[in-house]
Image: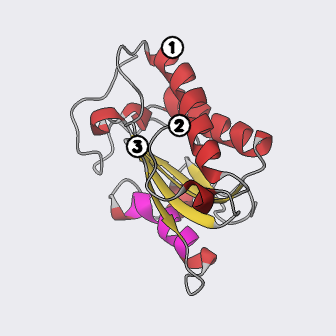
Amino acid sequence: MKRIRLAPEAYRHGDCFSITIATHLRKPLFARAAAARPAVDILRDVSERLTATVYAYCLMPNHLHVLAAGPDIWRFVDRYKQMSSYHIKRLLALDHPVWQPRFYDHALRREEAIENVATYIFENPVRAGIVTRAADYPYSGSLAWPDAVSSEAKATDLRESPGLHSSVVPDR
């Protein structure tokens, strides 16, 4: 088993976690719709297969934020990274990993409202200067609350976004 931050029991109780998974060397691999859309589809698929409740997600060009609960959240994250790596590496013809080996997690405390943490996640592209309204960002939402972010935004490339601070954007 890979080394994780907390004791393994902490991930098995169904607690709600705020999770951040960064891309390898923080490369903006998901600045293109062609990579971002499948990554979100894989998140949906893995959450269904492993019965994880995804309250909020936001796939940024170089990282993913997820607010999720489930019976084995570490396994959910590990499976997501495996599945998305397999597909994204082939799609973008990468010769390096998609994700960093570890991820950051924070178990929500009783005083932390899930809704507030979800809002914080949804606002990430606004804070990054990619969009002016969270509802305009096409790669965020909730798999538990269908109307959490009502977006009419279409899947779009983010390479020209003023909030994207890297020149290493894959062209494939």
The residues bearing labels 1 and 2 have C-alpha atoms spaced at a distance of 25 Å
Which residue does the numbered mark 3 point to in the structure image?
102
Task: Say which amino acid is labelled 2.
Answer: Met
Which residue does the numbered mark 2 point to in the structure image?
1
Pointers 3 and 2 in contact (C-beta within 8 Å): no
Q: Where is residue 22 in the image (x, y as percent from the top left)?
A: 38, 44
Q: Position of residue 42 (x, y in %)?
A: 65, 34
Q: Residue at x 62, y 59 (%)?
A: 9
How many badges with numbers are in the image? 3
Q: Residue at x 78, y 39 (%)?
A: 49
Task: Say which amino acid is labelled 3.
Answer: Arg
Q: Position of residue 108 (x, y in %)?
A: 55, 73
Residue 132 appears in view = no
- Relative to 128, does residue 139 appear above or below in the rendering? above
* Foreground residue among 65 and 6: 6
Which residue does the numbered mark 1 point to in the structure image?
90
